[in-house]
Amino acid sequence: MPNSPESSRRVTKSHSAAGSNARAARNTTLEMPYSSVSGTWSPFSGQGTVRRVDDNDNHYQLGRVLSAVCQVTGRQPGYGKQVSHSHRRTSRRWEPNLQSHRYFVPSEGRWVRLRVSVKGMKTIDKRGIEAVVAELKAKGVKL
């Protein structure tokens, strides 16, 4: 079994922070496939891929960072290529201009924090916060 390319082992590392405001220890699990060619356990060998799984970190979902999305307009990053002077192409993404902004909703008598693009802010200014919040609640967004 150790010589089969499908076999893998789990390595668990425990990180702990120092100080009085230390978070609980964070467990990180890394899948490491066995390479029958070199005869070693390595995260970069075999047909498996390195996958990071954090128990206490919600920024990672299926190995990807969650994308930046405007709550009002739904704007997302645009993907494309950056072309250098030598015409070498590398992947890049254009982030939307997202801002975290607090709005007071008079009908609820409380502040609501939204992550909106600048165009979303203009939409809120034009239509009003009450109409935008009502539309978001109809979509099922938790505010």
Image: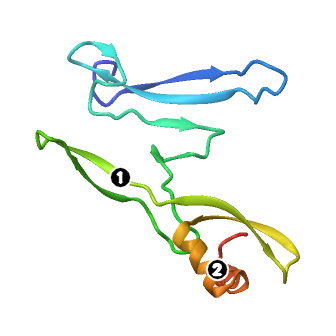
Q: Nearer the viewer, mark 2 or mark 1?
A: 2
Q: Secondary structure at mark 2?
A: helix
Distance from disc 2 to disc 1, alpha carbons, whole Å, reads 28 Å
Q: Where's residue 28, x and y in %?
A: 57, 29
Q: Residue furthest left?
A: 86
The amino acid at mark 2 is Asp
Quarter holding the N terminus is top left
* Residue drawn at the location 35% of the way across and 27% of the way down: 7
Q: Residue furthest top?
A: 39
Residue occupied by mark 1: 93
Q: Is residue 70 above or below residue 138?
A: above
Residue occupied by mark 2: 125
Q: Is residue 88 above or below residue 18?
A: below
- Choose between 15 and 83: the one closer to the eye: 83
Number of marks drawn: 2
Q: Secondary structure at mark 1?
A: strand
Left or right of 16, for residue 35: left
Q: Is residue 143 above or below residue 19?
A: below
Q: Where's residue 61, x and y in %?
A: 51, 48
Which label's residue is closer to the chain start, 2 or 1?
Answer: 1
Left or right of 60, for residue 27: right
Quarter holding the C terminus is bottom right
Colouring scheme, one of rainbow, by chain, secondary structure, one colour: rainbow
* Residue drawn at the location 32% of the way across and 13% of the way down: 40
- Choose between 97 and 107: the one closer to the eye: 97
The amino acid at mark 1 is Arg
* Residue drawn at the location 58% of the way across and 69% of the way down: 71
Query: What is the number of the mark on residue 17?
Result: none
Left or right of 97, for residue 39: left
Q: Where's residue 80, x and y in %?
A: 27, 55
